[in-house]
Amino acid sequence: MLKVDNIDVYYGAIHALKGISLEVNQGEIVTLIGANGAGKSTTLKTISGLLKPKSGAIYFEGQNITGKKAPDIVKMGISQVPEGRRVFANLTVLENLELGAYLRNDKQGIQEDMEKVFVRFPRLKERLKQLAGTLSGGEQQMLAMGRALMSRPRVLLLDEPSMGLAPILVQEIFNIIKDINATGTTILLVEQNAHMALSIAHKAYVLETGKIVLSGPAQELAQSEEVKKAYLGG
Ligand code: ATP
């Protein structure tokens, strides 16, 4: 469904991604794990059109999307939940959700998706008029996910959804991710919390300094001595 083929990405002189290739099949949860600065966020930003690769290509459903603009990529069905949530703090919960659908004009479909977001995140429904900046960290993560779902994505890119959340909320967010996947959305998940990510993913890639050093079924990687030592605390 989504194929990243040998991409190189630079920030000025910094060579952040060095020939990254990966594949996400329809219906899967695929996770990218790795230490700080390994290039996980850069990979997501390149897929979503925020960064351009210097070489290599990205295909979505067989179509070459390399270099397309971010809004066009959203329209095609790929939506990103950025690291650190980035909700619009001075807008209400409802306004944030509406912005997630700004590229759509099917009013009825938008309303249906809004209802689905309320079912999935009842806490957002209770806080529709509240300014997003006053939500708790967990609620902001839910809002960022709800906003992304309002574009009715076929692939959801999640950048560190567990960052800064209490353990009980981390569990809740991961349950929600599993459920979003179970209802038909393919997921590419970037996480520092390798333990949680490997527990819900079908497939995993391990990044180190801009390269993929290991990949395979998530269950297998979770058992690998190398991964245990480096990412699962021994
Ligand atoms: P983290 O979990 O800390 O976000 P990451 O694996 O997502 O780590 P990236 O954010 O993709 O890592 O960063 C990859 C490399 O690119 C790092 O060396 C980082 O310093 C560098 N980098 C990221 N963003 C920029 C930028 N805007 N300008 C210059 N260098 C950058």
Image (cartoon, rainbow, N blue to C red):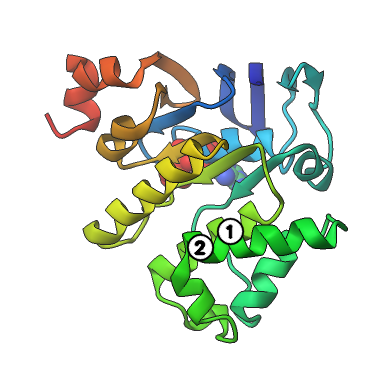
Asked if 120 appears above or below 202 in the picture, the reply is: below
Q: Quadrant of residue 94?
A: bottom right
Q: Residue at x 57, y 41 (%)?
A: 157
Look at the numbered disc 2 and give the secondary structure of its residue. Answer: helix
In the rendering, at what x and y percent does residue 105 appear?
88, 58
In the rendering, at what x and y percent does residue 184 appear?
56, 36
Q: Is residue 60 visible?
A: yes
58 displayed left or right of 206: right
Q: Which residue is mark 1?
A: 116
Q: Residues within 10 Å of mark 2 (few under 14, many from 20)?
A: few
Q: Residues within 10 Å of mark 1 (few under 14, many from 20)?
A: some
Residue in the foreground of this view, choosing between 68 and 102: 102
Q: Is residue 12 visible?
A: no
Q: Residue at x 36, y 47 (%)?
A: 174
Amino acid type, callout 1: Lys
From mark 2 to mark 1, how far is it between C-alphas? 5 Å
73 displayed left or right of 46: right
In the rendering, at what x and y percent does residue 154 appear?
66, 37
Label ID, residue 22: none
Asked if 210 appears above or below 90 in the picture, the reply is: above
Q: Residue at x 47, y 27 (%)?
A: 30
198 displayed left or right of 143: left
In the rendering, at what x and y percent does residue 12 appear?
68, 37
Asked if 122 appears above or below 213 in the picture, the reply is: below
Q: Quadrant of the N terminus?
A: top right
Look at the numbered disc 1 and give the secondary structure of its residue. Answer: helix
Label ID, residue 119: 2
Residue in the foreground of this view, choosing between 124 and 13: 124
Q: Residue at x 26, y 62 (%)?
A: 166
Q: Quadrant of residue 34?
A: top left
Amino acid type, callout 2: Val
Cβ–Cβ below 8 Å for labels 2 and 1? yes
